[in-house]
Image: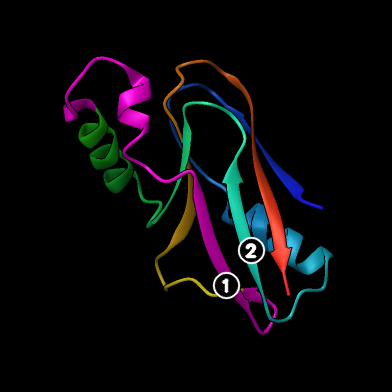
Amino acid sequence: MPYYVTVESRGRGAYDITDELRRLVKEKELRDALLLLSVVDPLTSLVTMEYEPNLIADLGELVDRLPGSSPYVKNAVFPKTLAVPVKNGDLALGSFQQVVLLDLSGRPGEKKVAVTVVK
């Protein structure tokens, strides 16, 4: 049974969901597991990166430079699923790494990420 992380999107942009995932790990008392993340909403994707304003701006520039006008084609370049290990009760991410929901929809509203725990 998946759990869900919900993001209140302002429209096109990048949204850090790392803290929500950490809360889930703590709430479910996970020590060593694997989180399988999957976007539910169309025109959303998942990436890991340093969530820093200049890098987020660079990511937006990259999206803008992708050929084609369709956000569906641009969104196809980014992954829809992501596996994040949990070790010793915390996400096993790099020092400057966060899990980021990328929303290319241009429409504000709730976006969901399904989280399946594999122990």
Residue 95 image-quadrant placement = bottom left
Quarter the C terminus occupies: bottom right
Closer to the camera in the image, 31 or 55: 31
Q: Verify CB contact (< 8 Å) between mark 1 and mark 2.
A: yes
Identify the residue shown where x is 26% and y is 32%: 63
Residue at the bottom extreme, as displayed: 88
Give the number of the disc on residue 38: none
- Residue 9 % position (x, y): 57, 27
Identify the residue shown where x is 67% and y is 63%: 22
Q: Is residue 87 left or right of residue 79?
A: right
Q: Is residue 36 left or right of residue 3?
A: left
Instruction: Check if residue 76 falls in the magenta segment.
Output: yes
Q: Which comes sooner in the sequence, label 1 or label 2? A: 2
User: Tag 1: residue type?
Assistant: Pro
Closer to the camera in the image, 90 or 76: 76
- Residue 2 % position (x, y): 77, 51
Badge 1 element: strand
On screen, residue 38 above or below 14: below
- Residue 51 % position (x, y): 41, 52
User: Tag 2: residue type?
Assistant: Leu
The residue under label 1 is 85
Badge 2 element: strand
Instruction: Check if residue 22 falls in the magenta segment.
Output: no
Is the residue marked by circle 2 packed among few (<14), some (14-19), or many (20+) residues within 10 Å? many
Q: What span is in magenta?
A: 64-90
Total number of numbered discs in the rendering? 2
On screen, residue 110 above or below 78: above
The residue under label 2 is 35
Is the residue marked by circle 1 packed among few (<14), some (14-19), or many (20+) residues within 10 Å? some
Q: CA distance from mark 1 to mark 2?
A: 6 Å
Identify the residue shown where x is 28% and y is 47%: 55
Identify the residue shown where x is 51% and y is 50%: 81
